[in-house]
Image: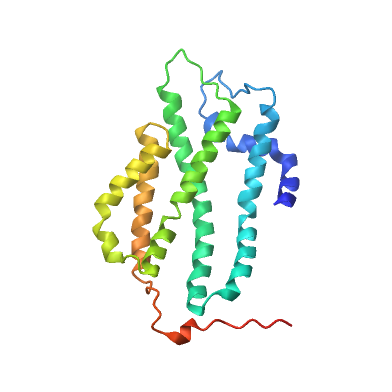
Amino acid sequence: MVLLFACMFPFANEFYLYLSIPLRSLLPEGSTMIATQVASPFLAPFKLTMVMALFLGMPFILHQAWSFIAPGLYKKEKRLAFPLLASSIILFYTGIAFAYYIVFPLIFGFFTATGPEDVKVMTDISAYLDFVLKLFFAFGIVFEIPIATVLLIWSGATTANDLAKKRTYVLVSCFVIGMLITPPDVISQTLLAVPMWLLFEVGILVGRFVKPNTDDDPEEDVKESTIVK
């Protein structure tokens, strides 16, 4: 991660400019982003680069963690764990991409279009960064819902049919969570709640093909031996 940060830091300003495109492209004529603190022009790109290095380095970190715990897993656990690990990484990045390319243009367009005519939009660069990072993390976690659903079914805590019967409660919960996490507007809440519900349905669909974890097959529970040369 340190190496990634060192390689990326010279381009920190370019990264921030790219991150701010969804807002800057919608600002009214004469409006611009501002820095309200002396160190913000340096600290905002610096913080962004740190977060990017962490996000981009996460697959390597998880791979190292997998290499450590894999020898202690049962065969049937490995068959499920690795696909879930790979899927969770892909889904997290997909959630971030969904937020940047779909959610941000919609909510920023709404915010900039509904303000008073005599008020110029001049967003602080640090406040903008904190806002988008919060939404990135929220959508990244939300896109992990299929993984959580499959794990619940695999562990035997519930079944796909039981979860399907609770659709109404889940849908209401999605909008409540969207209300708590996103800005207080209907568009943001809906853009988070609807994907949450759809991903829950995906989790149920995939979960129907997952065999619950049982101890009925002792041969499957024999750990693989590790040969150290």
Please tell me which residue is depicted at 44% across the width and 85% down the height of the picture: 218
Residue 72 in sight in this render: yes
- Above or below 75: residue 178: above
Q: Nearer the viewer, residue 1 or 112?
A: 1
Q: Nearer the viewer, residue 186 or 66?
A: 66
- The x, y position of residue 228, in whole percent, is 71, 81
Q: Nearer the viewer, residue 136 or 165?
A: 165
- Above or below 31: residue 147: below
Please tell me which residue is depicted at 67% across the width and 42% down the height of the picture: 49
- The x, y position of residue 135, in whole percent, is 49, 40
Please tell me which residue is depicted at 51% across the width and 17% down the height of the picture: 120
- The x, y position of residue 63, in whole percent, is 62, 64
Please tell me which residue is depicted at 38% across the width and 55% down the height of the picture: 199
- The x, y position of residue 221, in whole percent, is 48, 82
Residue at the extreme top: 118
Q: Nearer the viewer, residue 33 or 126?
A: 126
Which image quarter holds the C terminus? bottom right
- Above or below 104: residue 142: below
- In the picture, measured across the screen, residue 61 lies left or right of residue 157, that is right
